[in-house]
Amino acid sequence: MNPLPIRMVVAAALIDRDGRVLLAERPAGKHLAGTWEFPGGKVETGETPEAALIRELREELGIETEASCLAPATFASHAYEHFHLVLMLYVCRKWQGTPHGHDGQRLRWERVNDLFSIDMPPADRPLIGTLAALI
Ligand SMILES: Nc1nc2c([nH]c(=O)n2[C@H]2C[C@H](O)[C@@H](COP(=O)(O)OP(=O)(O)OP(=O)(O)O)O2)c(=O)[nH]1
C-alpha cells in the first residue's frame, strides 16, 4: 500500500502564437519555491479537472478559457517526500485576457526546447519531451 497521500493537480501549457509556453515562478515559502511551473493547482473534491484548471487560470493569471480549449497532453506520477503527485497537463492555445501573476508571481514565455535547461519541479522534467513533440 502506498503510504503517501495522493494529490491531484492540473496544469496548463499555454501556447502563444509564436509557439512559446508560459511558465510561472512558485512563490517564496511554498513547496518547490523558485522553480518554474506550468500554471495550475489542486483539483478540489467534486471538481472536474477541466473546471479546476479553468478556475486556477482565472485565479492565478486572470485569464478565461473553456473546456473545449483544453486538450489533454500528458501526465506525471511522481513521489515527493510528503505526498504522491498526479499532475495532469493540458495544452491550451485559446484564452481571453493577458496573463498576469495575480499573486505577484513572475511569468516568462519560453520555447519548449528551452524548458530542458530551466529549473522546473522534478515532476515536470519527464513531460517536456512529450510536450515538445505535441506543439
Ligand atoms: N501548478 C503546478 N504544480 C506543480 C507543477 N509541478 C509540480 O510538481 N507541481 C506541484 C507543486 C505543488 O506541490 C502542487 C500544486 O499545488 P498548488 O500550487 O495548489 O499547491 P501550493 O503549494 O500552492 O499549496 P496551497 O498553498 O495551494 O495549499 O503540485 C506544475 O508544473 N504546475
Image (cartoon, helix red, strand yellow):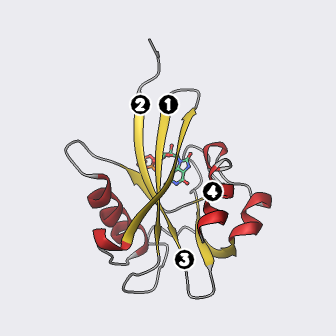
Query: Are the residues flagged by discs 2 and 4 in contact, CB closer than 8 Å?
Result: no
Q: Earlier in the sequence, mark 1 or mark 4?
A: 1
Q: Earlier in the sequence, mark 2 or mark 1?
A: 2
Q: Find the distance from the CA under tag 2 to the CA under tag 3.
A: 28 Å
- In the rendered structure, the answer to whether residue 97 lies left or right of residue 135 reads left
Report which residue position mark 2 lands on: 6
Report which residue position mark 3 lands on: 15
Report which residue position mark 4 lands on: 130
Give the amino acid type for the residue marked by disc 1 in the picture. Answer: His
Query: Are the residues flagged by discs 2 and 1 in contact, CB closer than 8 Å?
Result: yes
Q: Find the distance from the CA under tag 4 to the CA under tag 3.
A: 14 Å
Taking depth in this image into account, of 103 and 73 the one nearest to the observer is 73
Badge 2 crowding class, 10 Å Cα cut-off, few under 14, some 14 to 19, many 20 or more, is some
Give the amino acid type for the residue marked by disc 3 in the picture. Answer: Ile
Give the amino acid type for the residue marked by disc 2 in the picture. Answer: Ile
In this rendering, which labeled residue sits more in front, label 2 or label 3?
A: 3
Q: Find the distance from the CA under tag 1 to the CA under tag 4.
A: 21 Å
Give the amino acid type for the residue marked by disc 4 in the picture. Answer: Thr
Q: Earlier in the sequence, mark 2 or mark 3?
A: 2
Residue 134's mark?
Answer: none
The answer to whether residue 130 is above or below residue 5 is: below
Report which residue position mark 1 lands on: 84
The answer to whether residue 24 is above or below residue 77 is: below
Task: Tell me the element at label 4.
Answer: helix
